[in-house]
């Protein structure tokens, strides 16, 4: 009954079963109640068109809400959007934030970008 964590959990179970429409509905309700994990899931679903029509703008919106709410994987995804759009400076900033939030994936990406010359030694530290 209006428990966003439970709704998101049920949405994830439905997602794993392949019932993307139900997963979307549960995640949407959890997001409406302010759960950042649900916004992250909606971002992925809009990106892949699972349970909903593909919509990159909505995907980015939900990913941004999740990132602002402190979701490190959402920050990583925003970094990939920025990298794809050619804004390496913003991509690196997103990865640094995600790394400080404990994202191992972002640390690996920062190391790779350091080797390519996009990240300074100070930023890496």
Image (cartoon, rainbow, N blue to C red):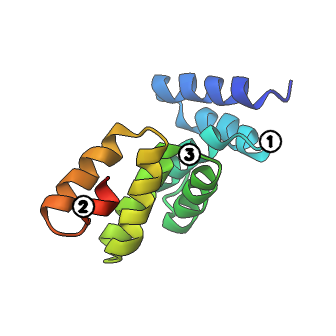
Q: Where residue 41 appears, x then y in whole percent?
A: 55, 42
Residue beneath disc 1: 33
Residue beneath disc 2: 121
Residue beneath disc 3: 40
Q: Is residue 50 visible?
A: no
Q: Where residue 98 appears, x then y in whole percent?
A: 45, 49
The span from disc 3 to disc 1 (Cα, nearest Å) is: 14 Å
Determine the residue positioned at 55% across, 28% down. Answer: 12
Whether pointer 3 and pointer 1 mark residues with C-beta atoms closer than 8 Å, the reply is: no
Q: Where residue 92 appears, x then y in whole percent?
A: 36, 64
Quadrant of residue 26 within the rendered picture: top right
Q: Where residue 50 appears, x then y in whole percent?
A: 48, 45
In this rendering, is residue 90 above or below 51? Answer: below
Counting residues from the start of the chain, the first of labels 3 and 1 encountered is: 1
Q: Is residue 54 visible?
A: yes
Label 2 CA crowd tier, 10 Å (few <14, some 14–19, many 20+): few
Compare residues 96 and 29 and report the one nearer the observer. Answer: 96
Q: Nearer the viewer, mark 2 or mark 3?
A: 2
Counting residues from the start of the chain, the first of labels 1 and 2 encountered is: 1
Counting residues from the start of the chain, the first of labels 2 and 3 encountered is: 3
Determine the residue positioned at 52% across, 63% down. Answer: 55
Q: Is 77 situated left or right of 115 in this image?
A: right
- The quadrant of the image that shows the N terminus is top right
Q: Is 23 situated left or right of 15 in this image?
A: right
The span from disc 2 to disc 3 (Cα, nearest Å) is: 30 Å
Label 1 CA crowd tier, 10 Å (few <14, some 14–19, many 20+): some
Per the image, label 2 sits on a secondary structure element best described as helix
Per the image, label 3 sits on a secondary structure element best described as helix
């Amino acid at each position: 009954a209006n428990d966003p964590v439970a709704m998101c959990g049920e949405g994830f179970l439905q997602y794993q079963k392949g019932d993307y429409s139900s997963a979307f509905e549960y995640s949407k309700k959890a997001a409406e109640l302010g759960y950042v994990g649900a916004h992250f899931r909606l971002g992925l679903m809009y990106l892949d068109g699972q349970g909903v029509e593909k919509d990159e703008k909505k995907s980015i919106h939900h990913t941004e809400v999740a990132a602002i709410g402190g979701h490190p994987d959402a920050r990583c995804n925003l970094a990939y959007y920025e990298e794809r759009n050619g804004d390496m400076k913003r991509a690196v900033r997103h990865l640094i934030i995600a790394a400080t939030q404990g994202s191992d994936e972002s640390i690996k990406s920062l190391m790779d970008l350091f080797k390519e010359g996009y990240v300074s030694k100070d930023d890496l530290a």
